[in-house]
Image: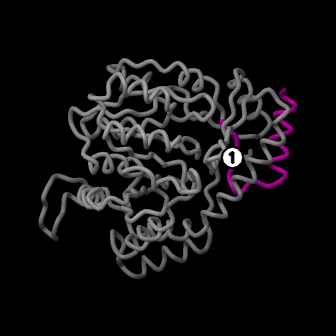
Amino acid sequence: MIPIANPEMGQAEKDRVVEVMDSGMLADGPEVRSFEDEFASYCGTEHAVATSNGTTALHAALKAVGIGAGDRVLTTPFSFIATANAIRLTGADPVFADVDAATYNLDPEVVEEVLREQGDEIDAILAVHLYGLPCDLTRLSELALEYDIPLIEDAAQAHGATFEGDKVGSFGDAACFSFYPTKNMTTGEGGMITTSNDEVDDKAQRFINHGRTAKYGHSEVGHNFRMTSMSAAIGRVQLERLPEYIEARRANAETLTEGLSSTSLTLPFEPEDRTHVYHQYTIRTEDRDDLRSYLEDHDVGSGVYYPTCMHEQPVYDDIDHDAPVGEQVASEVLSLPVHPTLSEGNLDHIIEVIQDYE
């Protein structure tokens, strides 16, 4: 079976973890600070704050930009549930705006419409760069500025993606990344907040560390959302390898697109002003379930990310929102293997199986 994901760990990661273990500094410490500095430099931001996972990064970032009880945050209905959950965990409520059918990201025209109607009641925009493709950051940044609200990037799937030549994570008031094992780089579990705002950085650092201002001084209620040094050690090696991972994913995506261009499938779209890093290579078809079964019968793994929009989940049945594009997309999307460890034979097999199905 060709897996939908295949996290790659090498001897360098193992050696770095052993070094940390031998040092005795297993929890938060210098290794984490080095990872933060290197990740901030990679993204082109002044600061980075390492966290225990992508969800805690989102939670802390939202708190750091001032989101709390009674606030309302505009976001996409089509993403992993953590996006909306992080909003709710601050005491705020999500406001779902529909997505663009080509990019699967927030549709700026719908965002503008919602802000025009509810602008006084919207306190932030949380934009997801789904599957590794950046949102329209120019228009979303303009709207955030016009309505004087913060823009937070959920870049959990978009490490190294670019918009007009600049890396995601450097556009919003804050941005959040996940290092879950299936992501384009991993720390096992982990997350990161990037920002060039000193105040956001300071608030995020305090929030993830019990509201601490001194060893036993605490200015506010916070959490233990810290990253371990062992996770950071893995992350530092993975960050060094991220450019080659991205190159391999993009090459694999290009091969898939060339091989599937004659089929009836809707293939991934990459606008000219953006660089897609293909956390997922996601197609669309009305025959999604039948095709997925056929792929499984022919030893090709696949995934559905995501079959149900967030506003249709039972946990959010108290929120009345309509997202017809998101709902349609959710019923048709299917992700194919695109990870760096695929061989030429794997790619040929995936293409041949789908062509035979057609």
**Residue at left 62%, top 69%?**
10
Q: Is residue 273 above or below residue 289?
A: below
Vertical comparison of 98 with 196: above or below: above
Judge from the rendering whether residue 295 lies leftward or rightward of residue 129; answer left or right: right
The residue positioned 45% from the left and 18% from the top of the image is: 322
Quarter of the figure that contains the N terminus = top right
How many dots with numbers?
1
| Above/below status of 334 relative to 33 | above
Work out whether residue 228 or residue 166 is closer to the camera in this orientation and state it.
166
Which residue is drawn at the image coordinates 24% and 36% (left, top)? 91
Residue 208 sits inside the magenta stretch: no
Q: Which quarter of the image is occupied by the C terminus? A: top right
Tag 1 secondary structure? loop
In the image, taking residue 184 as reference, residue 128 lies left or right, namely left
Residue 32 drawn at (x, y percent): 39, 70
Instruction: In this rendered view, identify the residue nearer to me: 271 or 16.
Output: 271
For label 1, the crowd category at 10 Å Cα-Cα, with few meaning under 14, some 14 to 19 and many 20 or more, is some
Q: Residue 234: x and y, percent? A: 50, 68
Q: Position of residue 307 (x, y in %)?
A: 55, 27
Q: Is residue 231 visible?
A: no
Q: Is residue 266 visible?
A: yes
**Is residue 350 inside the magenta stretch?**
yes
Which of the 4 image quarters holds residue 202?
bottom left
Q: Quadrant of residue 62?
A: top left
Q: Please, which colouring scheme is shown?
A: one colour
The residue tagged 1 is 3
Which amino acid lies under the numbered mark 1 shown in the image of this protein?
Pro
* Residue 55 falls left or right of residue 260: left
Question: What span is colored magenta in the figure?
Answer: 335-358
